[in-house]
Amino acid sequence: VTTLPPLPKTSSNQSQSQSNNDDNLLSTMASPMKTEETTTENGGSVAPTPVKTEAPPMNAEELPSAKKPRKDDDERVARAAKLMLKSGILSVPQAMLCSDFNSDESRDRALQQRVRRLHSKIEKGIVNPDTLQDVEKEFEDNIPLADKAREFLTQSTDPFVATKVCSEALDAAGFVKLSKREAFGGKLVPGGSYYYTTNHSTVVAFTVGAKFKPGNGFKIIGGHTDSPHLKIKPLSKRSGAGCVQLGVECYGGGLWHTWFDRDLGVSGRVLVRVTDPETQKEKIQQHIICIKKPIARVSTLCIHLQTAEERGAFKVNKEEHLSPIIGTQALLEAAVGKQINQFDDEDSWKKGQDPSLMKLIANEIGVEVKQIANFELGLFDCQPASLGGMKNEFLYSARLDNLATVFVALETILDYSQSPDVAEDDMISLIACFDHEEIGSTSTSGAGSPVMSEAVERITAAFSENPHGRD
């Protein structure tokens, strides 16, 4: 086992700058190692002792020439690592992993490649080494944006809620909401900002350049509002082992083993029957709900009830293992006993739902249970998104696929709509965030639908001589 050389120390009567300390450290890291074999009095040998050969310290300001022979590769890595160490891009342990004193098995090859690429950019003049000192400050300046992303990811629990969050942000920024039921002609003006939604789960927002003319181009950012989750089945009532469960299906391509032992809330769209005050006729209203109370949980079996072989061979059965528990059957039936048989005999859909779930939804909206006509709901992890790491360099969150793109697209169009660049722009800047990407995008609100082509056609036609026509 090769012993790592100690880090250079500064004596109490010696004052050295941080630059000199870094020079000595990287010089030590780049120094070749040799070993000396010692013998005992009986002539036997012991394990070789590593001896460090001192190398001249490197100048922190000196950069190697553009062309170096391959034998100097380790020195080039050490020099670039020194710059990254000073700027805070690399930690001391990371910088040491780039050096040549370690064994081949211990080196971080990926880290070395990263350092080499930086060194190459410095040699070519692409990167100024003086600016590397500001990397950490620049990183800290971006924390507010990361915190804003954290809030967005926490709020956007499903496509319907995500679209609602986007709509509220666009309204606050002065975007004009359009109706797809009406022609855009006569409503769009150069320099204006607009948006509309489809199915309450897809949002299209755009800013018209002040110099836009029909036939000019579009600058488009695309994303999708849906993420893998457990979707409540149309007939969700289920029970087993004295517990009330929810029948769910796996929506999209998820890592389903990560859904175990998490506090799950419910969100989505609910259709409610109401009476129109003008016509006195019944109509359907849509309500977007988000119940952040942890009402459901997919629990794992305790370790005492499984053998080691069973634990090692465990595979998720999507139909049997992922039905979350929402309560104990006896308690829930006693609490809502009067509701068990109150549903109309003709309404088979209501009979397929647990009465306690229906009551919870009705209370959230503020209606009676009998007014609920249907719903499209899913489960989500109640744990909010957070910033983590020693310097908050990580964003921990569910639904990063693909709400991270939705957030960036939304922030981009919001910032650009207030930018002076709009006055000189002759194009349309547009974002389109679709639903149902996780299941093929072929729905009426997916990316495979006419949503995108219709947006381009209707916006262009609104500025043409015939504002009610289509190109």
Image: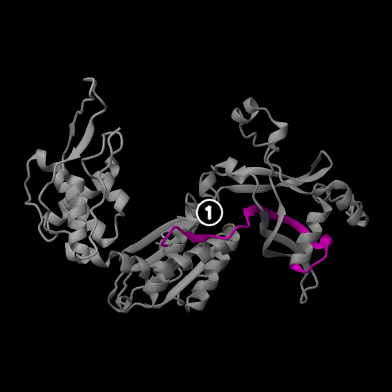
In the rendered image, residue 267, in percent from the top left (x then y), is placed at: 66, 58
Q: Relative to residue 148, is residue 114 depicted above or below?
A: above
Closer to the camera in the image, 67 or 333: 67
The part of the chain drawn in magenta is 365-391
Q: Which residue is under mark 1?
A: 399
Closer to the camera in the image, 324 or 300: 300
In the rendered image, residue 91, in percent from the top left (x then y), is placed at: 31, 54
Q: Residue at x 34, y 63 (%)?
A: 218
In the rendered image, residue 90, in percent from the top left (x then y), is placed at: 29, 54
- Amino acid bearing label 1: Arg
Q: Residue at x 56, y 48 (%)?
A: 228
Closer to the camera in the image, 151 or 274: 151
Q: Relative to residue 347, is residue 384 depicted above or below?
A: below
Residue 316 seen anywhere in this rendered image of the structure = yes
In the rendered image, residue 122, in percent from the top left (x then y), is placed at: 15, 56
State left or right for residue 98 relative to residue 178. Answer: left
> Is 437 inside the magenta-drawn segment?
no
Closer to the camera in the image, 224 or 114: 114
Question: How many marks on residues?
Answer: 1
